[in-house]
């Protein structure tokens, strides 16, 4: 059993958020929904790719910030493109592979190639890859490869 579960506070969009995320990720399920007297979801538990989440329709008191983000590791450019396009729908692009989705949650859409290049044992190659990443919005694997190669 997962001991730590991210708990997401929404104003009143919990059911919309769950529908949005479960339409994007392939391995998903809604495990529980507790409804308030008005019939709307008050809390819910759901899973995305094996990661459990809990959500709350808690009102407008708190907003998400970049201080917490979800790191989404992608195998290749096609997967980066898939998640970027879908999570960005109604959201805002940021820098270095980050975006804010329509609910204000921050995501890092990061290809394995970036992690490989940043961890390159050749510090010059790693620095070139990092410099290239700093100029990107959505991460471009081919451009990272070119930058690292020099």
Image (cartoon, helix red, strand yellow):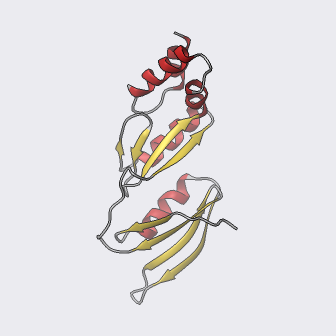
Give the quadrant of the N terminus: bottom right
Check the image and report above or below for 113 versus 55.
Answer: above
Hey, which quadrant is residue 32 in on the image? bottom right
Q: Residue at x 32, y 66 (%)?
A: 62
Number of marks drawn? 0
Residue closest to the far top: 150
The residue that appears at 44% across and 79% down in the rendered structure is 42
Residue 71 point in image, percent of width and height: 52, 46
Instruction: Give the percent coordinates (x, y) of residue 58.
Output: 37, 75
Is 56 situated above or below 135? below
Q: Eyeballing the image, is 15 above or below 93?
A: below
Looking at the image, is 85 positioned above or below residue 8? above
Find residue 92 and report its image quarter. Answer: top left
Residue reaching furthest to the right: 1
Q: Which residue is painted at 58% across and 31% down in the image?
A: 115
User: Residue 123: horizontal and vertical position, in percent?
Assistant: 55, 17
Name the outermost residue toward the left.
60
Relative to 27, is 111 on the left or the right?
left
Task: Please provide percent x and percent y for residue 141.
Answer: 54, 25
Q: Nearer the viewer, residue 138 or 123?
A: 123
Which residue does the image show at 51% across and 36% down from the upper left? 81
């Amino acid at each position: 059993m997962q001991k730590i579960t991210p708990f997401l506070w929404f104003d009143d969009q919990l059911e919309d958020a769950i529908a949005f995320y479960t339409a994007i990720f392939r391995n998903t399920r809604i495990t529980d929904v507790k409804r308030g007297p008005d019939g709307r979801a008050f809390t819910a538990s759901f899973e995305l790719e094996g990661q459990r989440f809990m959500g709350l329709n808690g009102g407008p008191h708190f907003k998400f910030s970049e201080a917490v983000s979800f790191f989404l590791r992608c195998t290749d450019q096609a997967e980066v493109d898939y998640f970027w396009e879908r999570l960005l729908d109604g959201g805002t692009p940021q820098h270095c592979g980050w975006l804010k989705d329509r609910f204000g949650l921050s995501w890092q859409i990061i290809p394995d190639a970036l992690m490989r290049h940043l961890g390159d044992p050749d510090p010059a190659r790693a620095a070139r890859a990092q410099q290239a990443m700093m100029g990107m919005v959505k991460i471009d694997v081919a451009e990272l490869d070119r930058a690292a190669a020099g």
